[in-house]
Image (tube, rainbow, N blue to C red):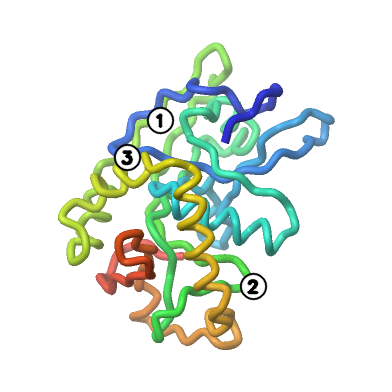
């Protein structure tokens, strides 16, 4: 998503983070309390975690943004994380916590019947976390550079080993597909989910084991695929 006007947090190609995979953020334009137009990031907020959601798959991000726009009646869009000023964002989101938590999303959670879960209408994401210590002297004059752990990407490869020789490499290739084509795939993937109303809370069947089921929409197969490998951090 490209923006022509000046927005707080949005600064094309200003984010020089280091990561094995490209990262994508979901955001919507809104006004701050001071009346300044800013790009508000989509955050995961739970009792045990509050962090900015970053997707390794642009397709997953588009699916999540489309569904969120429908549920909340607000327009959410997908942004390349390289176009987001992390220093401005951290200073405004976590000014006093001394840390920045990134929620690295690599799929969606499915129930015992392999139905994609949508608690309260929101897609339930599967993720790992990266926690960064924030210097108290952080300012626009001393910008932060985020270095994402390779351990999380190794774990993703392990999770999807039955479907991909190298999940990270394959998703990186997929991220280069044209926006128009990815948009069509995202619409199809979401259509399949929303047709199945059994994925909402009152019908969803979850056990201690199925909380680790991770779903991903396969473009070559034109259907959702599920990995059942247990991992250490779930939502």
* C-alpha span from label 2 to label 1: 32 Å
* Residue at image point 52% right, 35% down: 98
Dots 1 and 3: beta carbons under 8 Å? no
* Res. 151 visible in picture: no
* Res. 13 visible in picture: yes
Q: Give the class, few, some or many, for how many residues have Cα within 10 Å of label 2's Cα (few <14, many ≥20).
A: few
* Residue at image point 55% right, 43% down: 78
Q: Secondary structure at mark 2?
A: helix
Q: Secondary structure at mark 1?
A: loop
* C-alpha span from label 1 to label 3: 13 Å
Place of residue 91 in the rendered image (x, y in percent of width and height, measured from the top left) = 61, 29
* C-alpha span from label 2 to label 3: 30 Å
Place of residue 58 in the rendered image (x, y in percent of width and height, measured from the top left) = 44, 47
Q: How many numbered callouts? A: 3
Residue holding disc 1: 146
Name which of mark 1 and mark 3 comes first in the sequence. 3
Q: Nearer the viewer, mark 1 or mark 3?
A: 3
Dots 2 and 3: beta carbons under 8 Å? no
Please tell me the numbered disc located at residue 21: 3
Name which of mark 2 and mark 3 comes first in the sequence. 3
Name which of mark 2 and mark 1 comes first in the sequence. 2
Q: Nearer the viewer, residue 8 or 173?
A: 173
Residue holding disc 2: 120
* Residue at image point 38% right, 43% down: 177
The quadrant of the rendering that contains the N terminus is top right
Image quarter of residue 84: top right
């Amino acid at each position: 998503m490209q923006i022509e006007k000046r927005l707080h947090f949005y600064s094309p190609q200003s984010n020089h983070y280091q990561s094995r995979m490209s990262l994508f953020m979901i955001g919507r334009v809104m006004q701050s309390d001071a009346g300044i137009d800013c790009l508000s990031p989509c955050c995961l907020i739970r009792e045990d975690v509050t962090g900015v959601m970053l997707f390794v798959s642009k397709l997953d991000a588009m699916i999540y943004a489309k569904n969120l726009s429908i549920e909340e009646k607000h327009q959410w869009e997908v942004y390349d994380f390289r176009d987001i000023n992390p220093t401005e964002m951290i200073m405004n989101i976590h000014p006093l916590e001394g840390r920045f938590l990134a929620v690295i999303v690599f799929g969606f959670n499915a129930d015992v019947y392999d139905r994609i879960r949508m608690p309260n209408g929101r897609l339930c994401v599967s993720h790992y976390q990266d926690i960064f210590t924030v210097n108290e002297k952080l300012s626009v004059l001393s910008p932060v550079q985020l270095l994402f752990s390779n351990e999380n990407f190794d774990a993703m490869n392990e999770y999807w080993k039955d479907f991909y020789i190298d999940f990270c490499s394959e998703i990186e290739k997929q991220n280069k597909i044209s926006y128009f084509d990815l948009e069509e795939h995202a619409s199809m993937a979401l259509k399949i989910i929303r047709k199945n109303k059994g994925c909402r809370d009152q019908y969803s069947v979850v056990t201690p084991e199925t909380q680790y089921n991770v779903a991903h929409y396969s473009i070559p197969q034109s259907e959702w695929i599920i990995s059942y490998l247990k991992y250490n951090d779930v939502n």
